[in-house]
Structures are given as structure tokens and as C-alpha cells.
Amino acid sequence: MKWGIIFRVPLVYESELWELPPPTLIRRLSGANLTIEYSYMFEYAPQSWKEWQRVASMKIQIQKRIRKVEFIDYENVTADGIIYTISELGKSFKAFIKFPQPQFPDGNGEAYKMLCRHAKRLHYEEKLHIEQLIATSIRFNNIDSEGISQVLKRAKAAYLFSLTNKDSWNQRLSKTDLETAHKLGASKTNVKKQQDAKSNKLKALELKKSGSSINDIAAILNVHRSTITRYLK
């Protein structure tokens, strides 16, 4: 699967595009309103939730730099321009974007509901992009233990839900409401981290009893060896 960033702006703002890195493809579109379409193509689709979030971060930074940006659903097209890695394009968009913490589901069956709720928060903070929902859906996957295809389907369904309903989300959350939502999301995240640490500690102790070395245990659990050393004290 390939991926990229495609957006359009009114032709009158073309000069603002000059500060951006060279696109893979430029198209000028005629019609009721003259527009210019910029496409950045990646060598591969994002491979982790952090890479998906980084693409969402790039889109937000483009929104901040260019007026009247309209992002278009990605489609794989043939182009002769520069094909970027996510890291390469990210060098031109270095600003730190703080995304709200999602409220993690308590178990199977709640992930879609929590993802739609997260989409609404992203909408209020003007950070709603499909890539951020995919990143969050991947993080939920640790709880639901689903395949990546289901993770992507869930994110796309939540994104469609947000597009269908965002016009009715016209009442912005107050600062107090946003702070409460952030605290709730952080609380859920901390609980999950504590549960993961407790589970990994028990697994590490069992592996140690069976004769595994610290390096082996760290590799099996995908945890740093210093953390394993702390578990075994």
C-alpha cells in the first residue's frame, strides 16, 4: 500500500506554496474556481502509529502555512517528481504538534465508539485527519488484538462518521471541557501502561525461571533490557 498527501488551494494563493518543499506532482485545475493541486507521494505507507501521526502533523502544519487548504483523499498516481520517505518530507515540517490523548476502550467492542469520540475532539481542536485516526486505531489494537486490515477499516469508518457529522458539531467545547477530556484520556493511558508493566513483569519472571537471559527476555517482550533488570530485582 502506498500513501501520500494531496491538497488543493485557490490559485490566488499560489505564491504561498513556494515556501513548501518541491511536490511530487503539480496540477492546475479549471472550473468555477481555479485551483492548484499539490501532491507529495511517499515510497511506502506509514509503518507505525507514530509515522501515521507524523503525516497528520505535516497536514496540520500545511494548514497553518497556507490559506484555504482542502485536503483530498489519497489516490496512487503515476508521477515523475520526487518520491519522499516520511522522514525526508518531515524535515520540512518540524513543528511539534500536540494531539489530545484518546480515551482507551476497556475491552473488545468499544474501540469504534472511542475512536468516534476521539474524532470529535480532534474536530474541535482543528486536528482531524484520517492519519491521526489510523494512528489511534493502531494504538487500540493492543487491546482488541485485531489484524491491521480491521484496524484500518475502523479508522476509515470513524473518519466517515466525522465527515458526516462535523457540521452538527457546531458547539465548541469550553476550555474546562477540553481540560477534563485531556485528563480523562491521560488517566486511561496511565492505567494501560501500569497494566502492561505488571503483565510484562510476570512474564519476565517466568522466562527467567525457564533460563532465559536478560537480553533474550528483552527481545521477546520488546522492552529495554534496563527495564527487564528492574523487573527482576
Image (cartoon, rainbow, N blue to C red):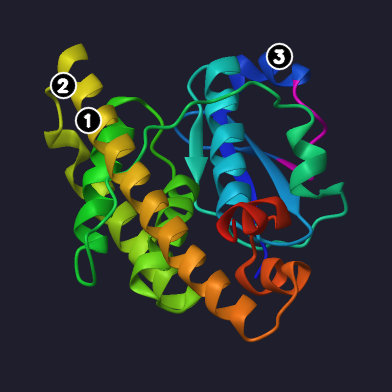
Q: Quadrant of residue 7?
A: top right
Report, in whole angstroms, how far the alpha carbon at label 1 lies from the one at label 3: 39 Å
Q: Is residue 221 above or below residue 70?
A: below
Q: Residue 192, which numbered label?
A: none
Q: Mark 3 or mark 2: which comes first in sequence? A: 3
Q: Amino acid at mark 3?
A: Ser
Tell me the residue that label 3 is attached to: 15
Q: Position of residue 92 (x, y in %)?
A: 77, 27
Give the left or right position of residue 30, taking residue 106 as reference: right
Give the left or right position of residue 211, taking residue 173 as reference: right
Image point (71%, 70%), residue name: 219
Image point (33%, 25%), residue name: 125
Residue 10 appears in the picture as rendered: no
Q: Is residue 166 above or below residue 221?
A: above
Give the left or right position of residue 153, taking residue 225 as reference: left
Q: Is residue 217 above or below residue 33?
A: below
Q: Nearer the viewer, residue 203 or 63?
A: 203
Question: What span is colored magenta in the figure?
Answer: 20-26
Q: Amino acid at mark 1?
A: Ala
Density class for disc 1 (Cα within 10 Å; few <14, some 14-19, many ≥20) is some
Report, in whole angstroms, how far the alpha carbon at label 2 lies from the one at label 1: 6 Å
For discs 1 and 3, the disc positioned in front in the rendered view: 1
Q: Are marks 2 and 1 in contact (CB under 8 Å)?
A: yes
Q: Residue 181, which numbered label?
A: 1
Q: Residue furthest bottom?
A: 210
Tell me the residue that label 2 is attached to: 177
